[in-house]
């Protein structure tokens, strides 16, 4: 299958098409296409972040010297690529977390490569983040639903286990990490949260 065919099948994952999932998982090139899809998603996320920071700078441009504005404009491409790289790292770690939970904690049947082929290519929906009127929360919600579908079908888990792997456990981990970070900030600077 070509990359264009994988993109078409990936959009079919958004409507929970089992045949599209089987075709993507069965395509060897889907790993490479998944990395390309994630890289494009990271670049689009960086462009959106850059556009929002440019909006702030445009409102404050009278305060910023011209040479600093020039340096900032030169570094924009670097920042977009840096954000894309960080996006790849974060997504890669979360993919591993999902696979670890589904395979080793809940006893799922799929391999990491099969999971990566399916879920990384479903990130074509993330490309819509470049549109300013699309809320990233909506994109995250749709990708969470697609992730539940992929985990449910690929790992052959019950629906509740798939929901636990895709949403509940990562959410608990995120909340615990935030509590740990805020708690450590309060420990090292007790007056930080007191008004």
Image (cartoon, rainbow, N blue to C red):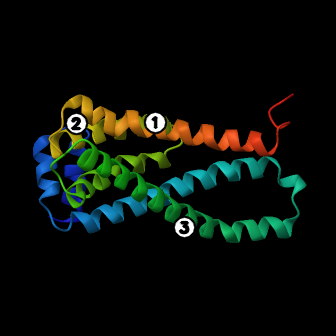
* 2 vs 1, front mark: 1
Q: Is residue 159 visible?
A: yes
The dot on residue 15 is 2
Residue located 16% across and 56% down the image: 25
The crowd level at tag 3 (other Cα within 10 Å; few <14, some 14-19, many 20+) is some
The residue at which mark 3 appears reads as: 81
Q: CA separation, marks 1 and 3?
A: 28 Å
Whether residue 76 is situated above or below residue 55 in the rendered picture = below
Residues tagged 3 and 2 counted as in contact (Cβ below 8 A): no
Q: Earlier in the sequence, mark 3 or mark 2?
A: 2
Quadrant position of the N terminus in the picture: bottom left
Element on which disc 1 rests: helix
Across and down, in percent, residue 90 comes to: 47, 56
The residue at which mark 1 appears reads as: 171
Whether residue 23 is situated above or below residue 162 in the rendered picture = below
Residues tagged 1 and 3 counted as in contact (Cβ below 8 A): no
């Amino acid at each position: 299958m070509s990359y264009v065919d994988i993109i078409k099948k990936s959009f079919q994952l958004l409507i929970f098409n089992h045949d599209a999932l089987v075709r993507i998982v069965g395509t060897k090139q889907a790993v490479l296409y998944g990395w390309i899809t994630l890289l494009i998603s990271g670049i689009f996320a960086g462009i959106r972040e850059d556009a929002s920071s440019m909006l702030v700078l445009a409102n404050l441009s009278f305060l910023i010297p011209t040479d600093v504005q020039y340096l900032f404009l030169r570094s924009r491409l670097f920042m977009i690529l840096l954000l894309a790289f960080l996006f790849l790292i974060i997504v890669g770690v979360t993919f591993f977390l999902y696979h670890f939970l589904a395979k080793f904690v809940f006893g799922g049947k799929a391999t990491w490569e099969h999971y990566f082929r399916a879920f990384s290519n479903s990130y074509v929906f993330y490309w819509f983040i470049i549109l300013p009127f699309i809320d990233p929360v909506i994109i995250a919600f749709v990708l969470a639903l697609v992730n539940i579908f992929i985990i449910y079908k690929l790992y052959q888990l019950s629906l509740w286990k798939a929901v636990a792997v895709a949403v509940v456990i990562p959410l608990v981990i995120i909340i615990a990490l935030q509590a740990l970070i805020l708690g450590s900030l309060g420990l090292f600077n007790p007056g930080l949260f007191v008004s």
